[in-house]
Structures are given as C-alpha cells and as structure tokens.
Amino acid sequence: MAAGAVGSGSAEAQQSAPSDAAREVRAGLNGATEGTFFHTVDTSYGKVQGIENAGIKLFKGIPYGADTGGKNRFMPPKKPAPWKGVRECIGYGPVSPQTQADLRSDYSQMIMWDRHVGDGRLGEDCLVLNVWTPGVDQAKRAVLVSFHGGGFATGSGNFPGYDGAQLARFGDVVVVTVNHRLAAFGYTHLADLGAPPEFASAGVCGVMDMTASLEWVRDNIANFGGDPSRVMIFGQSGGGAKTTTMLAVPAAKGLFQRAAIQSGSLIRLATKDRASESAEKLLAKLNIPKSRIADIQKVSWQQLLQAQSAAMAERAGFSPVLDGKYLPHHPFDPSAPAESADVPIIVSSTLEDAAAGLTNFDLDDAGLVKVLNERFAGKGQQMLEVYRNYYPDKPAFLLQAQALTDAGNRRSASLQCELKHKQGVASAYLYIWAWASNCYDGKFGACHGLDVSASFYNVRDQAMSSGGREGRMMAERLASAWVAFAKTGDPNNPKIPHWEPYNAETRPTMMFDSITTLVHDPRSDIRKLWAAMPAAGPARG
C-alpha cells in the first residue's frame, strides 16, 4: 500500500459491535419514541413544524419564494407571503415542471432518477427547500446547501439520493436541499426578442432563485442550529454547473464560504444569441408571435412543458444566459471569478463519468478504435495504446467512457483548479472518484453520480450498498471530507490521507478508491495526450 494511503482493511471499516447493531435493529423496527417528536421553528415568514427521527429534525417544503406561475412567470423571485399559525413542513413541496426519466435506462434505474419528484408534485409553486438538523438550538453548526443535478432541466432537492438526514447525523451539520425553476421555466431569454422590459431577467431567473434560497439560509438558518457564516454550497452534474455559476454571481457574494463541484465543471454560460434562438423555437411551439410575448404567461405549465420538450427535440437549450447584468461574465473564462476569490473549492470527476450516457456495452478494442477515430481525427489507435498502458484488463466500454470523460468533464475540472490556483487567494482541491460499484454487474464502472450518495453518507443507495462494507467505507471517506470542508474550509481529516491543495506543477489529486491515496499528476500520459487535443466543449450537465 502506498505511503499515506487508506485501505479497505483499516480500522474504520470495522463493523459495530453486535450489541450496538442489535439495539439499532430494535430501534428501527419500533420507531423513535423518546423526547419531543414535533418541533416548531420561527422563520422570516412564519412558524414551521418539522418532525424528528433519531435526533435529526426534518423540515420539508419550506417556502423561500412566492409561486412563480401566472404573472410571476419569468420574473425575478418574489418573497413568500407571510402566514399565520404554524405551517406543517413534514412532506416534500412541489417540483419545477420537467420531463421524466426513461424507465428503460439501466443507468437511470441504478441511480433511481425516476424518483426525483419524491412525494411532492409538479408545479410552479416550487420555490421551496428542505432542512435536516441535529438541533433547533444555537449551536451554530456548519451548513451544507445542495443544488441538485439533472442539468438545468430535471431533478429536485426531493430526490432520495439527496436526503440529508444521514449526513446531518454523521457530521453534526445542517443540510439544506433546494427546489428552483428549471429549463424553459427558469432560462427562457426573451430580452432580445422584443419582450416588455419586465421580462429582462427571464433568462436568469432560475439562478436568481438559487440566490434567494441562500438569502433565506442567511436570514433563517440560525434558528435551525446552523451558522450563516459557514455555508458550503455543492452539487453534482447539473448541480456542479449550478455551483460553478453561483461562484460568479455578484448578488450571491458573501452568501457562502466554501463550494464543491462534482462532475459539473461549467466554464462558459449560454450566449444571448444561442439563448434567443431557443426562445424563438419555444414561442413557435406555443404559436405565440413576438408581438405578444407576454401571452406566454397565460398558457398552462403543462403547455409550456410540452412546448419545451418539442423545442429541445430540435436542439433548443435552456440554461443560464450571459446577460451582461445579473451574470456579467462566464464563470471560468478567461479566469476564476473574482466574486468568490476568497472561497475555497473542491472539484471532481469520476473515472468513467461518461458511462452514464453510453449503451454499447459489448464494444471491443477494434470497435473502440473506430469510435475514437470518428470523434478524434483518426487518433484512435494511438489513444487506445496510451489507455491500455494504464488499464490492460478494463473492458473497452469503460476505456471509451474514460476517454470521453477526459475530453470533457475531467479537462474542465483540471482547468477550474488551475485557474483558481493562479488566482492565488483561496485553495482548490481536486479528486477523481475511481471506486466502481458492483451494481448491474459493475458494467458502468466508476460512473457519473457514484459519489453523490457517498457525499451525503447515504449508504443504502443501491449503487453504494452493492459494495457492502467497502461501500460504507467509501461513503465515510468522502462524507468526512465534506464535513471537514464545510466546518473549516479544509477537507483534511483522519479518514483520508493528507490532501494537498492543487497546484499546476505537481497536480495533487485525491484518488478515492478501495485504497484511497493522494497522487501527483495521476494518469499523466493520458493528461498529456488530451492537452495536445482541441477542447471537446462544455462539461456534461
């Protein structure tokens, strides 16, 4: 084992004593019976009631903004109306309208993406958030705010993989997940199509929602046992892209003090020209002429979602727009954002991130060379040889996934760390999640999203639980880094080897695997191969 590495046989992997396990089983079967069962907390808009489970207080569906339907559609978020009495916040709130995950996809089934609505419902009254806390006291715990994945088009903070109860219990921290406007509902750029002036923010209102959620955290989280001066934002895939975006939002400056970007290293935003083209397609599907753009507030959300789906089938895209006002510049082009210069970051990819979008599982080396030749200017054989030097026994399908990841997400992750290091104010920490789940016979490798449940310490997720004791150990390692980073701005803790901040000379990278170790410039020949290739475009969201 490498010096400083943490292996699967370490003391942390040992199971609890039988007597402890027996007590936990009895408690789980009988339910929580001790202490106060319901808890009421004051917020800026009224009292909310949550429920307790094993010491963790759960508050779900708390409004941080008003209904975004009707005359509020495509408008900046408004404050929620205050309420009298106590608002029950025990079940999840509404989710922004969206298309559903394909039930035929093994990958979607593995990560349970078809369950991201939770027990909520679709609708435009979706500016709600969820809080898990060990205590409604004045303990000033670190706060972890999760922005969900699904690109900018699907997902919600209600998703089972984002349940914050175990992380709150594991790390004595407060966990918050957020619902906000998505796709056409949050990012239809109408300002350059002759829309009335009040529609000026239609292309960025989903980002405005996230800022509003952080303002709610600033103003209210102390009553939930949290510390508004120690807020960490994080997210994976689209959640990583959202976190990246928030790093560059002037209005969000000071609302968070650390950030983590998992497999979602966004470098550039959508341009106004491209966003205007997408908005035109949406209007056409709704049969709304540019002379009556305001009529888009009159259609039902079902009609708008149907039109969005049809427009996206014609390559329309709906994501945050570089409007020059609310979003004045790209997040990491040409440099790291000045707005968050003092915010340390963690940035990551998974080894076979791109496997999530691939289905040619029977690919062989000859087929891989053909695929790579078609995508990368005839360099397939050269690329295969470089990868085989590192991975002589890996299936060609997983080498394909690695190559596509290296061409996009991983290159963007490294670039973010390089630019953050060059900025010279706060540290960046880079990791690669290389631990592969046994789920679906391991065919997806260390694919997109495997580190999500680990960061939440949700070890019952099937992708983690299929790894048995080792899966729990991997979750302990990453969740411990998350907790340490949220509390101090430094991810180092006894569960992992010493993690050096990134620098462009030695490129220290934590490799999260059954043997977790810090490696300087891992897979260096592969990195150099891609450094000589043209950029492949934006990161997967």
Image (tube, helix red, strand yellow):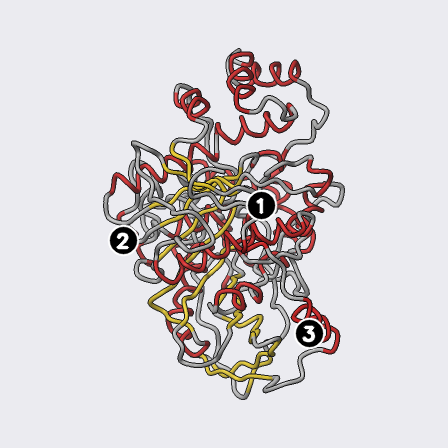
Q: Residues within 10 Å of mark 3 (few under 14, many from 20)?
A: few
In the rendered image of this protein, does residue 366 appear above or below residue 463? above
Q: Position of residue 87 (x, y in %)?
A: 57, 81
Residue marked by disc 1: 449
Q: Residue at x 68, y 45 (%)?
A: 108
Residue marked by disc 3: 23
Amino acid under disc 2: Asp
Lower position in the chain sequence, tag 2 or tag 3: 3
Hey, which quadrant is residue 485 in on the image? Answer: bottom left
Q: Position of residue 281 (x, y in %)?
A: 56, 39
Q: Mark 1 and 2 residues: CB-CB less than 8 Å, in contact? A: no
Nearest to the observer: residue 229 or residue 471: 471
In the rendered image of this protein, does residue 110 appear above or below residue 407? below
Nearest to the observer: residue 508 or residue 425: 508
Disc 2/disc 3 C-alpha distance (Å)? 45 Å
Secondary structure of residue under mark 1: loop
Disc 3/disc 1 C-alpha distance (Å)? 33 Å
Q: Residues within 10 Å of mark 2 (few under 14, many from 20)?
A: some
Amino acid under disc 3: Arg
> Which mark, by number, is residue 253?
none
Residue marked by disc 2: 342
Lower position in the chain sequence, tag 3 or tag 1: 3
Q: Residue furthest left?
A: 424
Q: Residue at x 47, y 47 (%)?
A: 240
